């Protein structure tokens, strides 16, 4: 009996999983199996290719999601190309020097003498308070950081000696190029070092805005109790070169009120950011580009007028640069207008860069990417904040593991692109049936009474 019951539970679980899988599959038109070289990771990232964009119907990409083996949606979010949430900036060591502590007034004047090398780097710092040299052994609360040889600093990472008491301080960062005039680069940054049992919470990153050769760390809320041991500069993430992808569209000429336009249809939700034209042979002309997302909506100008040209033969041709849009546009309908229409319809080339979908490996694998739905929507997930929280636990150099999307496979197909049928209101139907039935019953009684009435 126990064996039968065990097999029944297994069969019921498999049936429930299959029902969940089928239910989720009915909501999406397409799927891509996901695979990775790392089988056990907290989060993964998938680069979206042309087949994915061509399958998405929602303008905000909400009909794009990731399902686990049970057919359940996992936390996921679409991040732009070259997203800082994925790229990691390099860290380099910086030289630092203690500055004097104490009240800064006329009776307690501070004199700072800095010796610099020929390249501007700081060699030695000597501080005097009221004409007397301050002992460097004294605990200080302010520091001078030499950043003269480093470009692209976005934050400072501070290291300090273990504190005997909990630390909860705030510092500001000032910058200078000549050690005389200073400007604020960070008005207030919290520094935390708390211990509770075996748990430890630290906040050592100080973001800064702007560039300066020399940095000065000063307590912004009273005195500090920090014993600094090292300073690192976090550099801006290196600009990873991502090749532009292009969708070439063939259009048709349409004359409206005596003006010839060339209209195109883009199937998919590509993040279009660049535009280029293609015409055979030598060509030159002035163009304006418009787009819209619905055939009934008004046209919106995206760029132009600009001059597009192509001169010369193969291998030595001169051509105009692609036009850069103000932001990513996901419209479906595009229209070109020329000052002087050419003899042939130009090819419209729309440039885009693949975005990244990052998801948390919640539940059991295998995972799959699904897209194309008129009924399902991906739930909001604070993925940048989540990635930052994971980095605090696993280290600042942690990145989501790359997952590869396989070949597109059909799920519900075109059926998933149809809106869900409106559920019938059976209560209203029943009420109307009762009303009609009651009216018929009353009418029947009236007729029977009329027939049975004696003639006058």
Image (cartoon, helix red, strand yellow):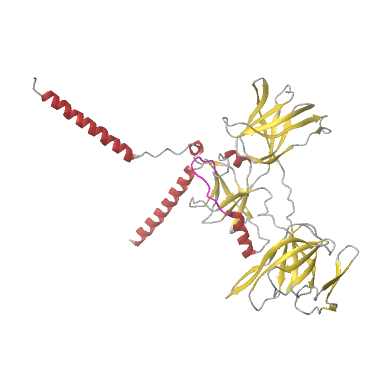
Residue 63 versus residue 109: which sits nearer the camera?
A: 109
Q: Which residues are magenta?
A: 371-382
Name the residue: 59% across, 54% down.
383
- Work out which quarter of the rendered image holds the N terminus and state it: bottom left
| Residue 241 % position (x, y) | 74, 48
Quadrant in the rendering for residue 101: bottom right
Name the residue: 74% across, 54% down.
238
Q: Is residue 174 above or below residue 78?
A: below
Q: Is residue 443 left or right of residue 108?
A: left
Residue 7 versus residue 223: which sits nearer the camera?
A: 223
Q: Is residue 108 above or below residue 291?
A: below
| Residue 86 % position (x, y) | 66, 54
* Magenta stretch contains residue 121: no
Q: Is residue 319 left or right of residue 266?
A: right
Residue 180 versus residue 277: which sits nearer the camera?
A: 180
Principal secondary structure, stretch drawn in magenta: loop
Looking at this rendering, what residue extends furthest in the right direction?
118
Q: Is residue 62 above or below residue 250?
A: below
| Residue 187 % position (x, y) | 70, 62
| Residue 6 % position (x, y) | 38, 59
Looking at this rendering, what residue extends furthest in the front direction?
106
Q: Is residue 103 left or right of residue 399?
A: right
Quadrant in the rendering for residue 350: top right
Name the residue: 56% across, 30% down.
296
Q: How many marks?
A: 0
């Amino acid at each position: 009996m126990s064996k039968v019951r065990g097999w029944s539970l297994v069969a019921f679980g498999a049936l429930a999983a299959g029902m969940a899988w089928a239910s989720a599959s009915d909501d999406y038109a397409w799927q891509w199996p996901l695979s990775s070289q790392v089988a056990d990771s907290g989060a993964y990232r998938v680069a979206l290719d042309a087949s994915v964009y061509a399958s998405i119907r929602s303008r905000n990409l909400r009909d794009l999601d990731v399902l686990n083996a049970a057919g359940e949606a996992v936390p996921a979010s679409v991040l732009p190309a070259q997203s800082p949430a994925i790229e990691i900036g390099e860290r380099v060591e910086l030289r630092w020097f203690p500055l004097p502590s104490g009240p800064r007034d006329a009776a307690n004047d501070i004199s700072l003498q800095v010796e610099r090398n020929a390249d501007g780097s700081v060699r030695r710092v000597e501080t005097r308070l009221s004409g007397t040299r301050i002992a460097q052994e004294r605990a200080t609360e302010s520091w001078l950081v030499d950043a003269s040889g480093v470009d692209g600093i976005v934050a400072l990472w501070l290291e300090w000696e273990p504190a005997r008491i909990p630390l909860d301080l705030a510092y500001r960062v000032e910058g200078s190029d000549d050690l005389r005039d200073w400007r604020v680069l960070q008005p207030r940054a919290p520094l935390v070092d708390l211990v509770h049992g075996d748990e430890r919470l630290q906040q050592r990153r100080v973001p800064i805005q702007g560039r300066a050769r020399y940095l000065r760390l000063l307590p912004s809320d009273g005195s500090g109790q920090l014993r600094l041991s090292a300073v690192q500069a976090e550099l801006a993430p290196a600009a990873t070169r991502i090749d532009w992808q292009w969708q070439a569209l063939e259009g048709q000429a349409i004359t409206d009120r005596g003006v010839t336009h060339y209209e195109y249809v883009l199937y998919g939700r590509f993040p279009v950011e660049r535009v280029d034209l293609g015409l055979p042979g030598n060509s030159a002309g002035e163009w304006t580009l418009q787009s819209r997302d619905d055939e009934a909506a008004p046209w919106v100008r995206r760029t132009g007028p600009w001059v597009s040209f192509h001169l010369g033969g193969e291998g030595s041709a001169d051509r105009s640069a692609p036009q850069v849009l103000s932001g990513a546009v996901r419209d479906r309908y595009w229209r070109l207008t020329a000052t002087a229409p050419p003899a042939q319809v130009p090819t419209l080339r729309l440039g885009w860069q693949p975005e990244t979908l990052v998801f948390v490996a919640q539940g059991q694998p295998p995972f799959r990417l699904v897209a194309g739905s008129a009924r399902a929507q991906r739930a909001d997930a604070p993925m940048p904040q989540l990635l930052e929280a994971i980095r605090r636990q696993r280290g600042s150099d942690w990145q989501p593991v790359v997952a590869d999307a396989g070949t597109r496979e059909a799920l519900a197909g075109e059926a998933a692109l149809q809106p869900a049928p409106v559920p019938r209101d059976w209560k209203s139907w029943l009420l109307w049936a009762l009303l009609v039935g009651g009216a018929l019953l009353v009418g029947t009684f009236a007729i029977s009474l009329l027939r049975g009435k004696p003639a006058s």
